[in-house]
Amino acid sequence: MNKSALITGISGQDGAYLAALLLGKGYRVHGLLARRSSDSMWRLRALGIADDVVIIEGDLADISSIDRALETSEAQEVYNLGAQSFVATSWQQPLLTAQVTGIGAMNVLEAIRRYDQKTRFYQASTSEMFGLIQRERQDESTPFHPRSPYGVAKLFAHWTTVNYRESFGLHASSGILFNHESPLRGIEFVTRKVTDAVARIKNGKQRELRLGNIDAKRDWGFAGDYVEAMWSMLQQEKPDDYVIATGKTTTVRDMCKIAFEHAGLDYQDHVVVDPKFFRPAEVDILLGNPEKARSVLGWKAKTDVVALIQMMVDADLERVGRD
């Protein structure tokens, strides 16, 4: 019998790419999906897999629906990607972020502990947990200092994963993923906000792009590469935590330059720095050290930031032109 997997947050960027990867490996793929008023299946349709996954309605805040999803899917692997994942929103909705992003992970782990402790678990941790960085390059031993309610909630989920691994012997691993983007990225995230604006400006539908701290530095990779690391973690004999990153950093300013130049534009003619987009507590630089993932998992990023941003601009140019 083929393996069965359950993905929370299957309609998100990572969930869609992971579902496609697992389907390609012969898995039966199930997705836990909270009912929302907006169309949340567009990414699965974009990858041509919407009809190939089994959707189970449920919510991370409702442990009974997680129990039902485990029973229905008979999953040997659970990937917890569901979260309130937009950092800016976490200041506006801190309690919701804590409930879904933090307690939600504990709900899944507790459901697995009660249902079948042989089930393997992946937690989507984040570089935002490092926050006010303690080392120039962040690896698995770097101290955490989150700078947003989102980072705090993710840190709770991360340490809960470690605790259930050590306390109950669960095969529970965390991927501390640095920023990863794609044409499927939500429009609220800065990379996609930029590439969408480039396409709209190129097509005469927009004149300027307003951003916050464009000198912030991030380690940006391609989400399609990063989901391969998630799968690899659950194939290991022993569970562990891994930093997943490119090991290179780029400013928002340089990312804008790459995106606008790819469309034959000059970012300086269109980008406006607007103080209202600055975070209450800024994370100035994040730079990951993926050496452990390379040596243990045999994983490394395949797509550099220039190719990534150009891919996203091309996709948005096609979409805006079509619309």
Image: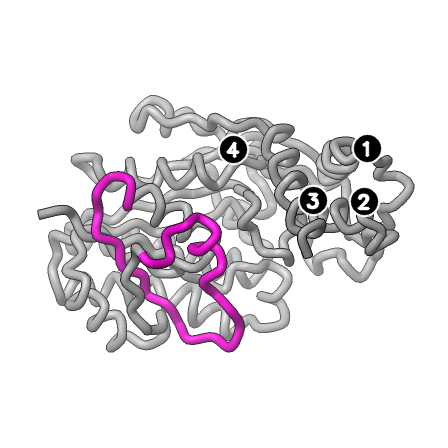
Q: Is residue 166 visible?
A: no
Query: What amino acid type should be assigned to the residue bearing mark 4?
Result: Gly
**Label 4 secondary element:** loop
Of pointers 1 and 2, the one earlier in the residue sequence: 2
Q: Which residue is mark 3?
A: 317
Evaluate if marks 1 and 2 touch, with contact meaning CB atoms under 8 Å apart.
yes
- Disc marking residue 202: 2
Q: Is residue 196 visible?
A: yes
Q: CA distance from mark 2 to mark 3?
A: 8 Å
Q: Position of residue 83 (x, y in %)?
A: 45, 62
Which range of residues does the magenta coloring cover? Answer: 23-51
**Label 2 secondary element:** helix
Based on the picture, tell me whether residue 99 belongs to the magenta stretch.
no
Query: What amino acid type should be assigned to the residue bearing mark 3?
Result: Leu
In the visual, does 315 lie left or right of 180?
A: right
Q: Which residue is mark 4?
A: 288
